[in-house]
Image (tube, helix red, strand yellow):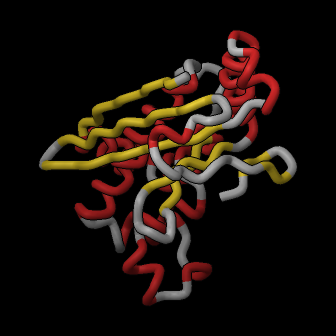
């Protein structure tokens, strides 16, 4: 079963939230790894542990960084739409947009988003007995882009065994309550 989510973000809205709420917005919405990825050129040149959100926002907030943050916001929105929950019952940092070794984006779910994934894919297994015998599997494809004032993203969730029709997407594997990223 395929589930699709898509989103469009007005980038100046993300910039306004950063200006208004500063580090609180950054800490509430983005995981430490997402922040590091958005400031990747800085993270390579300065010890990341020495930087705090206010320093990042006051001294290193470039248009490229805002575009990356907006793209990840759009991707997070697309993922929760594919999960069928919206943000109801799911925290912002429960959905993490990762960067795979190939450079393509990936999805890592934690906490309540992982529980929503289990419910979504379990529903598929209940309605498809062949899939139920293998247990719920989940594969994600996510893509995002930005141009001028807008960032857009699409996320596809494929539930069920034999769901490799989108190609060799990494399968979610579990460690404790989180999906391994």
Percent x, y of residue 14: 33, 43
Instruction: Tell me how many marks there are.
Output: 0
Relative horizontal placement of residue 156, taking residue 125 as reference (left or right): left
Q: Is residue 81 visible?
A: no
Question: Compared to 180, does 161 lie above or below?
Answer: above
Percent x, y of residue 50: 58, 82
Q: Which residue occupies 55% across, 22% down?
A: 1
Depth order, front residue of 118/54: 118
Percent x, y of residue 89: 67, 23
Q: Name the outermost residue toward the left.
A: 148
Q: Which residue occupies 57% across, 63% down?
A: 33
Question: Compared to 158, does 119 lie above or below?
Answer: above
Which of the image's four quarters has the C terminus?
Answer: bottom right
Depth order, front residue of 14/33: 33
Percent x, y of residue 110: 71, 43
Question: Compared to 61, does 155 lie above or below?
Answer: above
Q: Write down the quadrant of residue 74 in the picture.
A: top left
Q: Which residue occupies 66% across, 21% down?
A: 120
Relative horizontal placement of residue 36, taking residue 119 as reference (left or right): left
Q: Is residue 74 visible?
A: yes
């Amino acid at each position: 079963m395929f589930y699709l989510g898509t989103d469009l973000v007005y980038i100046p809205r993300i910039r306004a939230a950063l200006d208004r709420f500063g580090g609180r917005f950054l800490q509430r919405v983005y995981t430490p790894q997402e922040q590091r990825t958005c400031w990747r050129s800085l993270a390579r040149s300065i010890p990341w542990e020495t930087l705090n959100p206010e320093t990042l926002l006051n001294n290193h907030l470039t248009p490229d960084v805002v575009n990356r943050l907006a793209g990840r916001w759009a991707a997070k929105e697309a993922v929760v739409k594919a999960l069928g929950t919206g943000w109801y019952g799911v925290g912002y940092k429960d959905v993490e947009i990762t960067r795979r070794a190939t450079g393509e984006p990936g999805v890592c779910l934690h906490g309540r988003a992982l529980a929503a994934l289990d419910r979504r894919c379990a529903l598929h297994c209940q309605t498809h007995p062949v899939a139920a015998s293998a247990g719920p599997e989940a594969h994600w494809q996510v893509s995002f882009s930005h141009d001028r004032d807008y960032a857009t993203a699409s996320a596809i969730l494929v539930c069920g065994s034999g769901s490799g029709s989108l190609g060799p997407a990494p399968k979610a594997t579990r460690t404790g309550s989180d999906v391994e990223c």
